[in-house]
Amino acid sequence: MTDLAISRRSLLKTSAAGAALGLVGWPAFPTRVRAAATTIGFIYVGPKDDFGYNQAHAEGAKALKALDGIELVEEENVPETVDVQKTMESMINLDGASLLFPTSFGYFDPHMLAMCKKFPDVQFRHCGGLWDKSKHPTNAGSYFGYIAMGQYLNGVVAGHTTKSKKIGFVAAKPIPQVLNNVNAFLLGARAVDPTITCQVIFTGEWSLAVKEAEAVNALVDQGADVITCHVDGPKVVVQTAANRGAFVCGYHASQAPLAPEKYLTGAEWNWATVYTMYAKHLLAGEPLPNFTRGGIQDGFVKMSPLGPAVSEPARKQFEATLADIRKGGYAVIKGPLKDNRGKEIAAVGKAFPETAIELESTSFLVEGVQGSTS
């Protein structure tokens, strides 16, 4: 796929150059090629086997291969630059793609929006919360899930497992979704023991192996004995923590193979549910939704199987909480609750179910979380 990816971007560049020079016999770039099957394109910012963000999307895309009439085209390691525009354009012109999933956050503006304007009859759906009906084209849209519920369940298991009463979180950037996950992880642990605290270290980048390893080591040195994360590829976090003797909870996809004895559980995306829904709409000639959201109860998020180190009390509370979440309307943010600066977030008797918490509005860390940068 890498060789094909290079040729895609190169073809767009060299075809344009050849046409500009007026070279005799230079092949004209096709304006649009339609495959017999309905073609759907997936674009990943990193490798498809990163044990993280990109792998979760690739696993979801793979589920479409079971559908008759669908043909997939994929490209990995595409940077959040004009390169992704070239990739999208080639998928449309060379492969006849009628639906594209540029999965990385930074693909949206200006890259995906530029392609939406250039190809108004092609559908584009972006992973994240950026699409706005009032200002964005109707052939664009966004999809996302309430994965903080998964981090809450991670926290429940972590709360039963920790001996030091200190848990750790390696995070990329202090944006709303990340803060939501940090808060949920501690609140899940505090559902077991209200005295547990959480230390979070922000690396400043979505993928930076050296800083991720340094952050894990710093957390373990400060006493954290259960660690989770929100970075693109959790592999370094999981392996470093396990090597230091800490237990780990996963994120994005299952990292259980990386640390089978230390892996407790993990919050995983189940993008197969979302991608299958879009594909079936497309095959039926039905309009695609522009704004798609769901949680554990909708099959958008799933949990890794519990590992061998999970105790029976942890298993029972985990399963009971998971059953409650699956009923819908479960509230992680509920009063009395303050942030880590003493400001009231929720008064006694006030609760915010997952669907009421807009990712864009979460700008606080709850009481008991201490944050720092690496």
Image: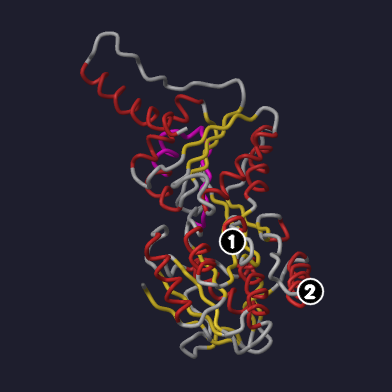
Task: Report x, y in % for residue 184.
Answer: 59, 74
Please state which amino acid type lies under the numbered disc 1: Ala
Position of residue 124 relative to residue 154, above or below, is: above
Q: Which residue is mark 2?
A: 316
Q: Is residue 182 left or right of residue 87?
A: right
242 on left or right of 118 = right
Q: Quadrant of the C terminus?
A: bottom left
- Amino acid type, mark 2: Lys
The magenta stretch spans residue 15: no
- Image vertical order of residue 70 relative to residue 359, above or below: above
- Residue 254, percent across and down? 61, 56
Q: Residue 299: x, y in percent? A: 70, 55
Mark 2 or mark 1: name the one nearer the start of the chain: 1
Q: Determine the residue positioned at 45% across, 39% down.
A: 116
First to last magenta residue range: 113-129
- Residue displayed at 61% across by 63% down: 147
Check disc 1 and report its element: helix, strand or loop: loop
What residue is at 40 percent from the left and 60 percent from the top?
A: 209
Viewer-side residue, 132 vs 222: 222
When asked about the image quadrant of residue 263, the answer is: bottom right
* Closer mark to the observer between disc 2 and disc 1: 1
Say which mark, if any, is on residue 259: 1
Q: Is residue 114 magenta?
A: yes
Q: Residues within 10 Å of mark 1 (few under 14, many from 20)?
A: some
Q: Nearer the viewer, residue 86 or 210?
A: 210
Query: Which image quarter: residue 15?
Result: top left
Left or right, residue 218 beside residue 253: left
Q: Is residue 193 left or right of residue 144?
A: right
* Label 2 environment density (alpha carbons within 10 Å; few <14, some 14–19, many ≥20): few
Going 22% across and 14% down the picture, which residue do you hit? 22
Looking at the picture, how far across and down is residue 303, in whole percent? 68, 61
Secondary structure beneath label 2: helix
